[in-house]
Amino acid sequence: MDSASLQPLLARIADALERLAPPADAALELTADAYVWHPEGAQLEPIPSVNRVAFDLLVGIDRARDILLENTRAFAKGFAANNALLWGARGMGKSSIVKAVHAKVNEEVGGTLILVEIHREDIPTLPRLLQRLKDVPRRCILFCDDLSFDQSDQSYKSLKAVLDGGIEGRPANVLFYATSNRRHLMPRDMIDNERSTAINPSEAVEEKVSLSDRFGLWLGFHNCSQEDYFAMVEGYARAYRLSVPEDDLRHQANEWAITRGGRSGRVAWQFIQDLAGRMGRAIETR
């Protein structure tokens, strides 16, 4: 096959490669408020409508909510702010707070904040994502939900360099928020194993737990009390106009929590969805 006959084929291959790998300045044109990062082809997929709970409905976790709000406000205004790790009990609104705070601050500052979600398994591609975002004129919050690392996972080392270290450092327009059920992002038995088998146990443990130290802001979430649980349920019921007498509402909510084996914000929300369904009502969360 001569070179002339190869030209059309080569042109098609070049076009396909350009579609898979958009130019570096494509990120400069980000106009949506939320995106999901797809490493394949370095794509930022816009999310037109984020699934979130309204800021005012985050009851029982007010302190953590307000601290993250102030940190995010400072960042949106161009002031100093910390990377944040939201850790603790399951279902207590860690990811809900991040999304609600982003929406509230965006309303206050005229949409200058972008929320970019990166999946746990894509953490090794963080440096590529930062390259795409560093020249964006808007400010960006990277969000990783349920971040944790297992024994054989070494990708936490790349995250350490991105958060606080490395020659280039984190771009000034980027902040990193993560949620995790683990305070140090690693299972307790993994840290204990390092302590028992290493030649220098303290150094081995320091290497593992120092990742969480890279987050300047730690927000802990603990199992909620019965009163906090009822406050969540009642807040949702008022917001969605589910007219049920308070005693009856609490009785039903308590039975629901017993069947689920515990109380949390997630359990309260699931009860409200069940209640709304039985009442023939739809719930709009966006």
Image: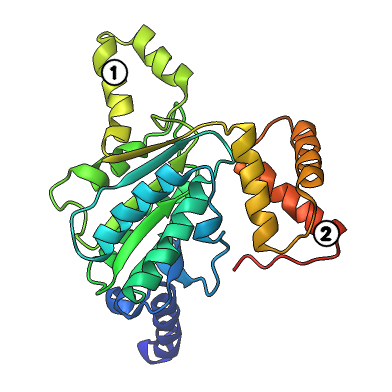
User: What crowding class fits label 1: few (fewer than 14 Cα within 10 Å), some (14-19), or many (20 or more)?
Assistant: some
Which residue ends up furthest to the left in the rendered image? Answer: 167
Residue topped by disc 2: 277
Picture quadrant where residue 35 is located: bottom left
- Residue type, label 2: Gly
At a point 22% along the width and 71% down the height, the residue shown is: 135
Q: Which mark is residue 259?
A: none
Counting residues from the N terminus, which is met first, the one under dot 1 or under dot 2? 1
Residue in the foreground of this view, choosing between 18 and 94: 94
Q: Which mark is residue 204?
A: 1
Task: Locate residue 84, reporting x and y percent.
Answer: 34, 45
At a point 76% along the width and 67% down the height, the residue shown is: 282
State whether residue 129 is above or below residue 15: above
Residue in the foreground of this view, choosing between 140 and 52: 52
At a point 42% along the width and 65% down the height, the residue shown is: 104
- Residue type, label 1: Ala
Quarter in which the N terminus is drawn = bottom left
Element class at badge 1: helix
Task: Locate residue 186, reporting x and y percent.
Answer: 43, 28
- Give how far apart the Cα atoms at labels 1 and 2 are: 52 Å
Residue in the foreground of this view, choosing between 35 and 97: 97
Q: Colour scheme in the image?
A: rainbow
User: What crowding class fits label 2: few (fewer than 14 Cα within 10 Å), some (14-19), or many (20 or more)?
Assistant: few
Element class at badge 2: helix
The answer to whether residue 127 is seen in the rendering is no
Task: Locate residue 67, reporting x and y percent.
Answer: 35, 47
The answer to whether residue 77 is seen in the rendering is yes
Q: Is residue 217 left or right of residue 31?
A: left
Residue in the foreground of this view, choosing between 49 and 264: 264
Task: Locate residue 234, reporting x and y percent.
Answer: 67, 50
